[in-house]
Amino acid sequence: MNPVVRGLVIYIFLLIVFRLTGKKSLKETTTFDFVLLLIIGEVTQQALLGRDYSLTTACLLIITLITADLLLTFLRDKFKIVDQVTDGAPLLIVDHGMPLMKRMKKCKVDESDILHAARLERGLTRMEEIKYAVLERDGSISIIPYPPAEKS
Amino acid sequence: MNRGIEHVDHLIEMDEALALHETGWKVQRVGWICFMLIIVLALLGLFGNGVLSRQKSETGGNMIEYERFGRYESSTTLHIVARTVDGKAVVRIPQHYLQHFELERIIPSPVAEGVHNGYYVYSFTADESMHILLYGMLKRRGSLEADVKVNNTALKVSQFIFP
């Protein structure tokens, strides 16, 4: 198969597969996840190159992958729906100290993940001290505490 | 029972795109089911090496066994059981098939080989019916069909090779 077609197929396939695996909190990423990523990288490399280790193919594939990424970035900038479909959208998971359990369950985030982010980011110790928590597009959790005046 | 997610009025300036989230979760579930289905089908041999893939063609005591599904540039084996006639067995493989099946090894080694009428002809000697194994690599994507002749008996080989 033509290396350009090969590169594009792999790019689109990985985009779909990783999008389907869902937004996972970065805090949940384990050492094993990294090992898994390395294995996926190795498998992808074989599928991309096959038995062709020529410099031309390597250069063609690099250009193809980078161009595909540039094109996707352009489409994301141009069309908001492409941006939201490929990268997702932020999601509120705590509202005025109340965890929104259905949303959290869908996103595979639990209270300990939120409290972990609260301690790490803001030095907060209790759920009631959190005004809002947002699961961001990149899987990180943003914590917005009550303003000091509102707290009392 | 309300199965939807909580709808909250908040003051944060952000577009949650809740409808998209909900569609996304549904698509995700369908995707996971597809992943599992693909794995099960792969285990059964839809992409080669399994019960769905094993195929046999038999006529007049001659038989060929092969993988119905293959993967591009993967190794595969044609297993032929040939009845000997006067201590000889002759296998004829169409040239067009061998253009896409890169033959690596034949066990046992043929005593003679040649080309005749668009076929590669391999001759073997044995006292009784014999097993012949052809090891090779699939070099074509899509369907690949051929009539392999064993002692002039045509045995159909029909394969589909995934990219």
Image (spheres, coloured by chain):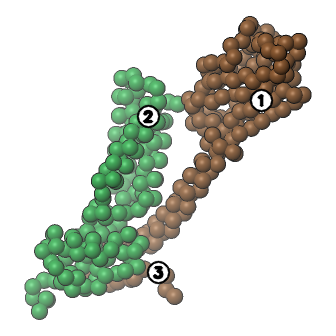
Chain colours: A green, B brown
Residue position marked by numbered label 2 in the rendering? A46
Above or below — where is B29 with respect to B161? below
Which comes before the other along the chain, label 1 or label 3?
3
Q: Amino acid at mark 3?
A: Gly
Which residue is at the front of the view, A39 or A59? Answer: A39
Nearer to us: label 1 or label 3: 1
Q: Is residue B4 left or right of residue B126?
A: left
Q: Residues within 10 Å of mark 1 (few under 14, many from 20)?
A: many
Nearer to us: label 3 or label 2: 2
From the image, which quarter does the C terminus of chain B lie in?
A: top right
- Secondary element under disc 1, as helix, strand or loop, is strand
Q: Residues within 10 Å of mark 2 (few under 14, many from 20)?
A: few
Residue shown at the point (51%, 65%) measured from the top left: B29
Q: Quadrant of residue A27?
A: bottom left
What is the x, y in percent for residue A19?
A: 42, 57
Q: Residue furthest left?
A: A148
Residue position marked by numbered label 3 in the rendering? B4
Residue shown at the point (37%, 63%) measured from the top left: A23
The disc label shown at residue B113, or none:
none
Q: Amino acid at mark 2?
A: Gln
Q: Residues within 10 Å of mark 3 (few under 14, many from 20)?
A: few
**Is the residue at mark 2 from the same chain as the one at mark 1?**
no
What is the x, y in percent for residue B14?
A: 29, 72
CA–CA distance in space, label 2 to label 1: 32 Å
Question: Chain under label 3?
Answer: B
Residue position marked by numbered label 1 in the rendering? B64
Q: Quadrant of residue B8?
A: bottom left
Residue shown at the point (29%, 77%) measured from the top left: A111
What is the x, y in percent for residue B118?
A: 77, 13
Q: Amino acid at mark 1?
A: Ile
CA–CA distance in space, label 1 to label 3: 57 Å
- Secondary element under disc 3, as helix, strand or loop, is loop
